[in-house]
Image (cartoon, grey):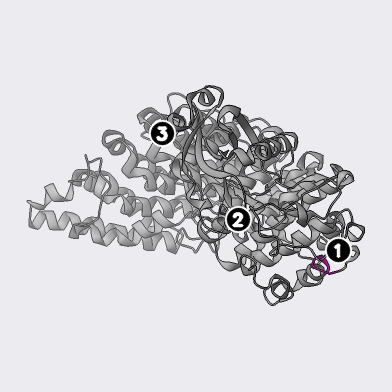
Amino acid sequence: MWAFFGRDASKDFAYDVGEPAVSFTGSFNQRHTFWKVHGGKKKGSGDKVTIFLNDSPDAYESALSYVKKLKTLRHPSILMFLDSVELQSKSLVYLAVEYVEPIFYHLDHTLKEDNEKKQIYISWGLFQITRALSFLINDADLRHNHVNHTSIFVNSCGEWKLGGLEYMEKISDSTCIPNKRYSRYEDQNTYQIPETSMSQITKCSTDMYGLGVLIWEVFNGPLQQSSPRASLTNTDNIPDNLRRLYQELISERASQRPNPADFIMKSRKPGGYFKNELIDALLFLEEIQMKDKIDKSKFFNSLAPAIDKFPKLISCHKILPQLINAFEYGEAGASVLNPLFKIGQMLEHEEYQAKIVPCVVKLFGSNDRATRSRLLLQLEHFIAHVPDSIVNEQIFQQVVLGFLDTNPTIREQTVKSIIHLAPKLNYNNLNVETLRHFARIQAKDDQGGIRTNTTVCVGKIAHHLHPQIRQKVLISAFSRAMRDPFPPARNAGVLALAATQQYFLLSEVAQRILPALCQLSTDSEKTVRDSAFKTIKGFLGKLEQVSDNPSLRETMEADVHSTATPSLSNAAATWADWAVTAVTSKFYRSQSETLKSSRPTGSRPGARFLSKPASLEASSASSMSTTTTASSVASLASSLEPEGEGGGGGGGGGVSKGESMSD
């Protein structure tokens, strides 16, 4: 491109000019402007831009005037100037602006949303253009004179931008009807205003008529030059809550057309066209620095469910940056996490790592319990996007502090989080650090539900453990659970043994596992007894099969030293399917108060038993159920004291370096 137009300009221009922009070859064509539109990239970074270029001597001065106007205007809803260069000897003008597409191309090709989301998106776009006109007319004393679809562009964030400044002028300097200024590049009849003399024109009448034209075109398509006035009076496709104000915009009496500021005010009233969840949310985010902490928290808590109604483009490129900014520099607190992670699910993997992962790492260092709780609850939704190195080097060390937290909710959520972290943890973090914490919790935590779920978690992550570690710790861990005074913990130990049966040598089954299970055959709780009998029968069945056919031993013990995920495909394993389902799909749902434990057969006299112990197989809303049935994450901000991470698990004290699950 540059070789054709001359190399001098390229030395001063920070952008490479590409091929003609395909998006500008439709309704936006040479009939509307003297500009030719090309794609472009910023030298060095490769960022996409749009290049307007003029090579016509007749339009050279007009192009220079356009550049000057755009360069001096800075507003969020006006096309963003980046750079320009002129080469007078060749009548060349290059203008670089942010990457944009014509409005109709964007609505027809780029925006891929259902009609409901498209309609709410259009309302936001028209709001932006109306706000731009208010700025020009009321603040800058400027009249655009050319408001219609050919002057509206959409950037990569989905924001509508007002361009087409060819005919813009100072209101106070206006000397003739705007239509008379149209050159050969525009059909005067199509967008002609009704006024025939300057005395009829008000400060805003011309541009507000243009806004009416734009509204009609957005809902009907480009205005045809054959009978534009008759077309504009057809309001069938105009939304009901916009129709009355639209009719004021296209009124033949200029004085009846509202000022853009008044148009916005009326449309923002309850039931108005600009009064909806998307515009409310985006305006709140624009003013978030002026909001107090309570308003921010209330807003972010309501934003997550509303995101489902918003276009993906707006959520990812408009709302998400504001959420990240609010998190990094504001007082958003834990309430920002739900919408942050919800939008994060819409991102591509690379984009997620660039935008969300840095926030996640920073969040895990927070001392705020509510924030940590929300992070742990949301872990399964974002951990797949976090590189293993970051998990092991930065996140894990923050997570394990939760094992020592004095608040039971945090301790239990930390235990459950290991399910999602385990596939990414290195040998030391999983097989040494995690298991040492689990051993302490099983032995010392004063919450029966947490001890129960620790056993469930060990069963769930067994296939991630190193074979040598697994062979060493599983029987010890589950045997410890079967001696727990809390009935669901004992039941969890039995179920976990059955669910992980493929990891045990047959000699261990006979010498260690069956004796431990037989002790529970007289347990005080029928649920525990039933699980024990079923598991005993299964293990005895394995031993009997091998006794009848010794060649099956190798098949039975094939997974003991394997690092692969077991398939339970061999016939000897199918008996344990019931236990696998119980252990791998359910966590025990703890009660809000500390449960008084009961002891198994042989416990001290006077021990108190629960008459209706909760079963490990009881239904649960999800595998990440909270510790307290009545509490919710929203209430954690007030119920969890803002202490530091330390403090020791309830009744557990610190972690002894010599403590392990095989003890």
Contact between marks 1 and 3 (CB within 8 A): the answer is: no
**Position of residue 615 measured from the top left corner of the image (x, y, whole percent):** 48, 60
- Residue 117 visible in this rendered orientation of the protein: yes
Q: Is residue 250 magenta?
A: yes
Quick one: which residue is furthest to the front in this view? 58
**Residue at the disc numbered 1:** 257
Q: From the viewer's perspective, is 467 left or right of 116?
A: left
Q: Is residue 136 magenta?
A: no
Q: Which residues are magenta?
A: 248-252
Number of numbered callouts drawn: 3
Residue type at mark 1?
Answer: Arg
Viewer-nearest residue: 488 or 7: 7
Report how far apart the C-alphas of labels 1 and 3 lie in the structure: 61 Å
In the rendered structure, which disc, 1 or 3, sits on the residue that comes first in sequence? 1
Viewer-nearest residue: 252 or 353: 252
Contact between marks 2 and 3 (CB within 8 A): the answer is: no
Q: Secondary structure at mark 1?
A: loop
Residue 103: image tag = 2
Report how far apart the C-alphas of labels 2 and 3 lie in the structure: 43 Å
Viewer-nearest residue: 224 or 356: 224
Residue type at mark 2?
Answer: Ile
Contact between marks 2 and 1 (CB within 8 A): the answer is: no
- Residue at left 74%, top 48%? 167
Of the two numbered discs 2 and 3 in the rendering, the one whose residue sits closer to the viewer: 2
**Residue at the disc numbered 3:** 388
Q: Secondary structure at mark 2?
A: helix
Q: From the viewer's perspective, is 400 left or right of 538?
A: right
- Residue at left 22%, top 41%? 562
In the rendered structure, which disc, 2 or 1, sits on the residue that comes first in sequence? 2
The N terminus lies in quadrant: top left
**Position of residue 552 measured from the top left corner of the image (x, y, whole percent):** 11, 52
**Position of residue 176 measured from the top left corner of the image (x, y, whole percent):** 84, 52
